[in-house]
Amino acid sequence: MDDKAFFTKILGIRLPWFVKQVVVNEEQQRVNIYVDHEPGIKVRCPECEIFYSLYDHAPERIYRHLNTCQMATYIHVRPPRVNCPTHGVKKIDSEFGENGSDMTFAFENFVIQVAKECSIEGIGRICGLSWDRGWNVLERAVKRGLARKENKIPARIGVDEKSIARGHKYESLVYDLDAGTVEYVCDDRGQDSLESYYRQFSEKMRADVEAVAMDMWDPYIAATKAYIPDAAKKIVFDRFHVMRHVLEAVDKVRKNEHKQLSELGEHLLKGTKYLWLWSQENIPEWRREEFDTLRAKDLRVCRAWAIKENLRHMWDYRYEANMRKYFKRWYFWATHSRLEPIKKAAKTLKAHLDNIVTYARHRITNALGESINAKIEKVKRLACGFRNRAHYRTAIYFHCSGLDLFPRPSEKKTLCFKYG
Ligand SMILES: [Zn+2]
């Protein structure tokens, strides 16, 4: 078998195509494969599907293909053109790679697989691509995936905000809570950000949304009420976000108390921040004794801590009425605690109670969002070279959205031919 027959076979090249020439350039460590078609063929107009004699060729296209052993391999091909009396001169789309790509399907698929595992710089090193070309593969993959994505709003969604870079820039993220994927990413965290997601769907589709988990964040609440029928029964304030308000209050109590004690020369609250914030069962073994000693003292933070721990049990209830009853008792306790930050947090919760207790029915949280958050942190690390927000969004879609990213040859044969 000579080299032409060898490459015709391993590249799976079929008539009328054949390998005309193989040039191995040892100095450049490059294999150039020239593919041509048989002479004298008639070619079908892609519009009307009538066969005409070959007109001429479009300029040569060069596709990067998978390496031949250690050598970068390129396929050279001249796409034929047909001159149809009705439709004019038409180029026949290539079967080697996607329209507009300078990579074969196989090579582009390989780059995407590598991109799933490493940074753009890593793609560059492994695949021998510049940053821009590596990035371009990601962008095309996401565009392809979004175009293939079914226009459907998930039944149970989570809405979350995510700060990007340092500073105060935010992105809004919409999750499919059942699939565990990011459905949508957009700039900012205003009402219009979330509405731009909802607007993609018909009212009938939006009516099928069963539940929406979110933070107690007015713009998201307003957007959901404006677009999701019956939103009042469907919005569930994420329990972890709810707890965060109380945790912040506990921390404020600790800070104030620590400051006052320090002024009196007492430093017993130094280094104890997380002891009060961790859930009781998560306090590390080696700090339990220290914690028990502190709890035996008459401290304000200790009371705040007990109020915080107590609230956690509200989410154990299966019925809304029981959650409300539990909250009522807790609220009385919290508002009579003489701890200002705790009182303030309790009032915030009370104002939002109707959509905290919806948890009893829907039992959703954005905890999934937390696992996605971990993934996003990884994405940030992989993409230390993000140059702007659009890049950041692309990377989230690429890594967290479960999109169908890979290019495939079209199912319809593009070059239809006949002899003579
Ligand atoms: Zn035609």
Image (cartoon, rainbow, N blue to C red):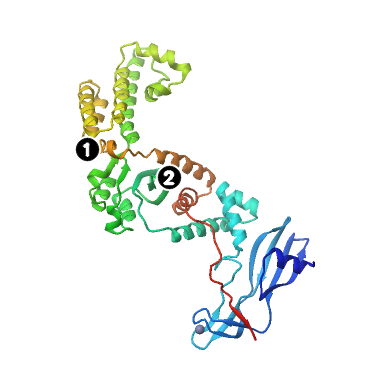
> Which is nearer the N-term, disc 1 or disc 2?
2
- The three-letter amino acid code for the residue at tag 1 is Asp
The furthest residue to the right: 1
* Residue at image point 66% right, 71% down: 14
Residue 27 coordinates in the image, percent (x, y) = 78, 60
Q: Is residue 285 above or below residue 61?
A: above
Give residue 345's position: percent from left, percent from top: 26, 30
**The C terminus is located in which quarter?**
bottom right
Q: Residues within 10 Å of mark 1 (few under 14, many from 20)?
A: some
> Mark number for residue 354?
1
Label 2: which residue?
Answer: 180
**Toward the viewer: 100 or 188?**
100
Residue 241 as seen in the image, left or right of residue 131: left
Report crowding for label 2: few under 14, some 14 to 19, many 20 or more residues within 10 A (C-alpha).
some
Residue at the spot x=25%, y=39% of the render? 355
Q: Is residue 115 visible?
A: yes
